[in-house]
Amino acid sequence: MTRYPLSSYKGERAEVCVGNISFREDSFVTIAGPCSVESRDQILKTAETVSMLGASILRGGTYKYRKSPYTFSGLKEKGVDYLVEASRKSSLPVVTEVMSVDKIDYLASKVDMLQIGSRNMHNTPLLKKVGKTKKPVILKRGYMATIEETLLAAEHIAKEGNENIVLCERGIRCFDNSLRFTLDLAGAILLKENSKFPVIIDPSHATGRSNLVKPLCLAALAAGLNGIMVEVHPEPRKALSDSEQSLTFDEFADLMDSLSIFSKNKNKITQKFGD
Ligand code: PEP
Ligand code: MN
């Protein structure tokens, strides 16, 4: 018997709805926004722009994990208020990371979707409590986690009653340190093969380099995955976190253009290669 009965794929895929957006077999959802909400102006401008360019969900970190205790760690409640205002003004649903059990109820009451970060994928109390909320959740693969551990983490959430789970491959650590992490694209495909939940990728955190984001997003679309999460900032060079991996508005526009062109031709291409 499978070790993850609720999360495994048994011929039917789960549909996850976030506001009016739906992650399902034939959809490709774009989640875009800054690494961190830095100011009201920054998040309002980003929300308006990514919405106009076709993003479906707005992201923005409000409580941030940082390597150093001396760097910006998010605007916290004030950031959440700005994010909610940006959501209202742009009509985009919003997702933000929940880092600790004590913030789950508060964040679940404010945003449309929660995110469990890579560093917390093994935090069982957090998984279980998010499982009790029924709130849609992006579960990021731990950067040192196997595929099975990721599916077992999803199972903790599902077992508490919440099956609104989107799995996200965001890069793993391996011997090669040329990039920030290594995007395990085959692993993402395997996740989808083994699980009924939608699977997306986050090429921003996986690579740490903005110029690698577009080709990997196209690869995710070609591979039949269910979407992408990308970091976008009005002025990436001035970003308070993850500046090198954030797309400018122009780069995001170009990405959306390329995805749309690829998407129109996808059926032709996959038929040709006998998908
Ligand atoms: C994020 O998406 O804001 C983030 C911190 O990602 P990860 O947990 O994958 O590092
Ligand atoms: Mn980031």
Image (cartoon, rainbow, N blue to C red):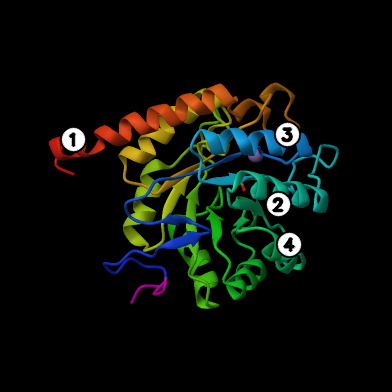
Look at mark 1 in the image and give the residue it sits on: 268
Rounded to the nearest whole Å, what is the CA distance between mark 4 and mark 2? Answer: 20 Å
Rounded to the nearest whole Å, what is the CA distance between mark 1 and mark 2? Answer: 40 Å
Q: Which marked residue is nearer to the observer: mark 1 or mark 2?
A: 2
Magenta segment boundaries in residue numbering: 1-6
**Looking at the rendered structure, which numbered label has been put on residue 84?**
2
| Rendered residue at 56%/52% (across/down) | 142
Circle 2 packing at 10 Å, graded few (<14), some (14-19), many (20+), is many
Q: Amino acid at mark 3?
A: Gln
Circle 1 packing at 10 Å, graded few (<14), some (14-19), many (20+), is few
Look at mark 3 in the image and give the residue it sits on: 42
63 up-or-down from 248: above or below: below
Q: Amino acid at mark 2?
A: Val
Q: Amino acid at mark 4?
A: Ser
| Rendered residue at 65%/30% (across/down) | 233
Q: Amino acid at mark 1?
A: Lys
Asked if residue 260 lies left or right of residue 208, the reply is left
> Does the closest atom of ligand 1 sit within 8 Å of the Cβ of label 2?
no
Which element type, helix, strand or loop, lies under badge 4?
Answer: loop
Look at mark 4 in the image and give the residue it sits on: 100
Which element type, helix, strand or loop, lies under badge 1?
Answer: helix
Asked if residue 198 lies left or right of residue 133, the reply is left
Which element type, helix, strand or loop, lies under badge 3?
Answer: helix
Name which of mark 3 and mark 4 comes first in the sequence. Answer: 3
Residue 200 spot, x, y in % from top left: 45, 48
